[in-house]
Image: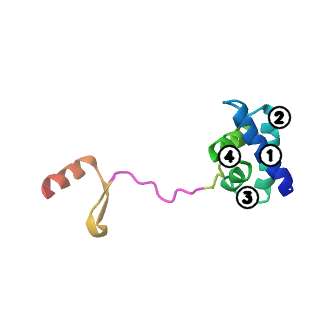
């Protein structure tokens, strides 16, 4: 998009704010989102895009969620190496006591206090 087109979008945002409070007209919102999506595809951040078109980053993020759906979380496979039962007590200087029953933890605290 050219600088002139970007400036035109920013001017339309300003005019829409002056004319009324509340939501932007749907046609303007669609134009802004087309611009934003194009910029995001080139690697621009939401903060950069919002500054370019004069819309808050929060509004732009909301529109992005509405248009593109929530971000998909990438799942990573995990492997359980060892299943542990019991409690762990961690102390100062890296002291660590593992696999204690609740009674053993209570006894330890009684002795330390």
Magenta stretch: residue 79 in it? yes
Q: Above or below — where is 23 with respect to 77?
A: above
| C-alpha distance separating marks 3 and 4 | 17 Å
Which range is magenta?
78-87
Q: Nearer the viewer, mark 1 or mark 4?
A: 1
Label 1, secondary structure: give it. helix
Question: Label 4 belongs to which residue?
Answer: 71
Q: How many marks?
A: 4
Question: Label 2 belongs to which residue?
Answer: 27
Which percent across, then down, holds residue 4? 85, 54
Q: Residues within 10 Å of mark 4 (few under 14, many from 20)?
A: few
Asked if residue 3 can be seen in this view, the reply is yes
Label number found at residue 44: 3
Name the one closer to the observer, 24 or 81: 24
Name the one closer to the observer, 54 or 68: 54
Residues at marks 2 and 3 touching, judged by CB atoms closer than 8 Å: no
Q: Earlier in the sequence, mark 1 or mark 4?
A: 1
Name the one closer to the observer, 21 or 48: 21
| C-alpha distance separating marks 1 and 4 | 26 Å
Q: Earlier in the sequence, mark 2 or mark 3?
A: 2
Magenta stretch: residue 90 in it? no
Residue at the image point whose x is 62% and y is 44% from the top: 58
């Amino acid at each position: 998009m050219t600088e002139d087109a970007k400036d035109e979008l920013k001017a339309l945002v300003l005019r829409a704010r002056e004319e009324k409070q509340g939501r932007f007209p749907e046609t303007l919102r669609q134009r802004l989102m087309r611009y934003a999506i194009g910029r995001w595809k080139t690697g621009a951040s939401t903060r950069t895009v919002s500054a370019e078109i004069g819309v808050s980053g929060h509004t732009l993020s909301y529109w992005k969620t509405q248009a593109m759906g929530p971000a998909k979380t990438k799942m990573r496979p995990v492997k359980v190496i060892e299943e542990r039962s019991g409690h762990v007590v961690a102390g100062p200087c890296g002291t660590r006591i593992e696999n204690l029953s609740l009674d053993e933890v209570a006894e330890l605290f009684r002795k330390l206090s």
